[in-house]
Amino acid sequence: MFETSVEHALDNLTLNDGMSVSFHHHLRNGDGIINTVLEKLYARNIQGMHLFISAIFPSYTSIIDGIKNGHIHSITTNYMNGPVAQYIYEHGLKGSLTMQTHGGRARAIKEGESLIDIAFVAAPTVDMAGNASGAIGKSACGSLGYVMEDVAHAKTVVCITDTLVETIDDPQIDGRDVDMVVHVDSIGDPRGIVSGTLSITKDPIGLKIARDAKRFLLQSGMIQDGVSFQSGAGGISLAITKEFVNILNDKNLTASFFTGGITAYHVEALEKGLVRDLYDVQCFDAAAIESIGKNAHHRAISADMYANPLNDARHIKDLDIVILGAAEIDCDFNVNVTTDMHHKIIGGSGGHSDTAEDSKLAIIVSPLFKGRMPLIKKKVTTITTPGEHVDVLITERGIAINPRRRDLIERFKDSHLPVMSIEMLLEKAHDLSGEPRAITPPEKTLGTVESRHGKPLATLFRKG
Amino acid sequence: MAKTITVGSLESSDCMITLKEGTGNVHIESVVAAAFYDHIETLVRRVLKTHEVRNVDLTLEDRGALDYAIEARLIAAIKRYKGDDNG
Amino acid sequence: MARSFLFIPGNVPRMLQNMDVFEADAVIIDFEDSVSASEKEDARLLTERFLTFHEVSVDVYIRINADKALMKADLNAIDSLPITGIVLPKASPDTLNVFEYLNEYKPCHVIALIETPDAFFKFEEIATHTCVKGLFLGGVDLMHALGGTMSKETLSYPRSHVLMAARAHGLYAIDTPWTTSDDDALARDAAYAASLGFDAKAAIHPNQVHPINQAFMPSVKRIEEAKRIVAMHEKHGSMRFSLDGQMIDKPVIDHAKALLEKVHTYQSGGENDV
């Protein structure tokens, strides 16, 4: 069960054409095993694989060779950008591309919709019983949340590690689910695993949005003792997280939990006693990695326990407030975080759709313009998150509340905040930028965006 | 009349315009070409016509400037080209 | 009763078109020191085109040039624009007269920028000039002219004198901009200027605006007190009464009303948040 090289491991595995292989993205751009394993599979002439990877980062360039040379037939993922996304936009895939959500991926694995032949798991530390943890080791990444369902359900599980220890006290992966452990020199580059310290935005427009978001939250009445909260790792989201934590401090309140991606700002709140628990599905910075290893109230959770819509015990079922971004939004409040206006993939849902649906208050924060291009469209290029789950849009020039939320509209009717209809905000945008010409989609289809429930939401297109 | 005049910058939301002696060619490069090319070209030609600018080649490098900024930069360039800006 | 005046260079489109996003109560579009000689005409055209085609929700001032030829072109460019007033740099009786003349003696609203040692000997003439509605301390240029460095101590006399002159003549008083990027120091400096009695402070970066607004906003305690004073006055209809052992008379009542007016105008929402 213990191998000393990837080659030896592959020698001892059953490798078939058309097999489904899975990887996780927790080592981000510092990942050292995805390219290695894929290249070795190509060298063994495995054809037509289904690549089932939680996200594709710019450094996973061997995927391009795999597509070019027939080794990779189709891909299912939750997020992608960079050269791989560019290649797929220009050349397509033999099979199709399916974009899922983090919760939807867990659902699909558990329900047997997505079958995995081999899960290749980059595991920062493994012990002699095959247990694994992401919190410790020279290539520590924190939580291994996105791979836990793969490990539980894949036919074969291969853990690849660079740090072998005697025993792990608090493993994230159970050794009984692991079929093979491969011990290599290095599974990744720490400098690429974490991007240093993420910091709040300094952009004056971003800070204005954060101030209005703070004011909105204060007036919403939702900040009570026991409130739960989630935000992304973008500069504006972090600014709002900081404001939110300051409010808890000023009002002597304690939040019940924060979920999602964890950063130094979330950890600081935990250590100051302003929040009781962190449910961590992904560590974004070094402070988060350090905290998960030493603080019992900072727990790694699986994507299933995070956001699987069929799991009644999922944490986001109790989520009060989520702060999310958008590349585009339309007058029905549908949000696109998957493609740019030319249909090229620039991201993906990740946990966007999951948290928007489950949370009590889903707030989109974004500048009203990217250069001359307005954020608000008549119709988004691609639907990632349906408008019925999106409650509020906060931009630097105005706040729009989804008409479905009559309670919020009533609550804010006398507010001094610049609340207006989304049509009004679109008009304001056009007063400045002019109305952009509508872009016709390219003719060739590429695949589908799936909702967290597995239903098709939007079609993906390719240029070439 | 001057030979070549350049105004503006390549900062976000700005544009750089070059005017030189020529035959009336208008060359536009814009980061928002897909959405606004026709609109920008119409604007540029209108301003050139209003200011009776002839025998000039124009190059516009746009970084998402709004109409008012394109127009202002263009008028500044025209004035400088004709030699009657007040500096 | 603006609390913050944000400087915006007139030749930077990105700043012009976002001028009313940063929550400054007033904006000073600069045609002077932050715009190079070769771009002055661009600044005029960008400002004129922008304000002609777009409405903004802030009070707009233009800092014109002191040089006569440049000032003439500046005033021509802004002639029909919906601006509140102009900021006159290196204010002196002479520059004020030149402005008045070039402005064709039309009604005017001038904020005199006090930034030369000479101005300190001409306060009477400057402050009583028909156009002047406010005095603005230009600490950076002033300290440069004195040969010193800007600090709370070195600004002490200039600040008191500008404030005294403004109050003696019913003008409003704007404190000097803060030039380092230390946010905490800016907030402290703004609070100090507010405690001296200044009405507002200038900002040279959008991120300075919010701390300045907060510093020049009355405290919760003072708002509560003002509410009580006005309520008492309205209930009893009297102009002179005692509240918490303090004698309340007309100036105090007027001040309380003006304070509540200011709070109402600049309230952004959210409990005690501004």
Image (spheres, coloured by chain):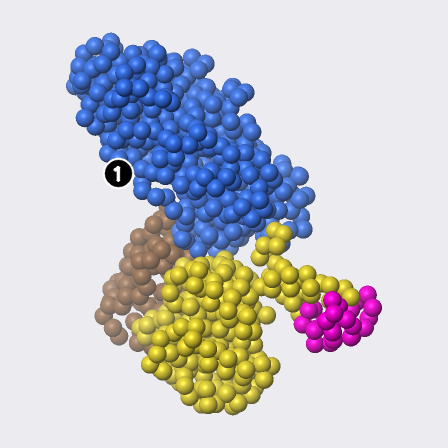
Chain colours: A blue, B brown, C yellow
In this view, the residue in front, A194 or A216, is A194
Nearest the viewer among A61 and C105 is A61
What residue is drawn where x is 43% and y is 73%?
C152
Residue at x 42% of width, y 36% of height? A262
> Label 1 amino acid?
Arg
**Where, by quadrant of the figure, is residue A300 drawn?**
top left
Report crowding for label 1: few under 14, some 14 to 19, many 20 or more residues within 10 A (C-alpha).
few
* Highlighted range, magenta: C233-257
Please determine whether, in this image, residue C197 is positioned above or below residue A38. below
**Which chain's residue wears label 1?**
A
Q: Position of residue A184 (x, y in %)?
A: 20, 23
Q: Can residue B25 be seen here?
A: yes
| Residue at x-position 55% and y-position 66% | C216
Using the image, determine if residue A367 lies above or below residue C231.
above
SS type, badge 1: helix
The answer to whether residue C29 of the structure is visible from this angle is no
The residue at which mark 1 appears reads as A191
Q: Is residue A172 magenta?
A: no
Q: Quadrant of residue B23 in the image?
A: bottom left
Q: Residue at x 28, y 59 (%)?
A: B59
x and y percentages locating residue C151 in the rendered image? 40, 73
Image quadrant in which the N terminus of chain C is located: bottom right
Rendering coords of residue A381 (x, y %): 44, 36
Is A34 situated above or below C215?
above
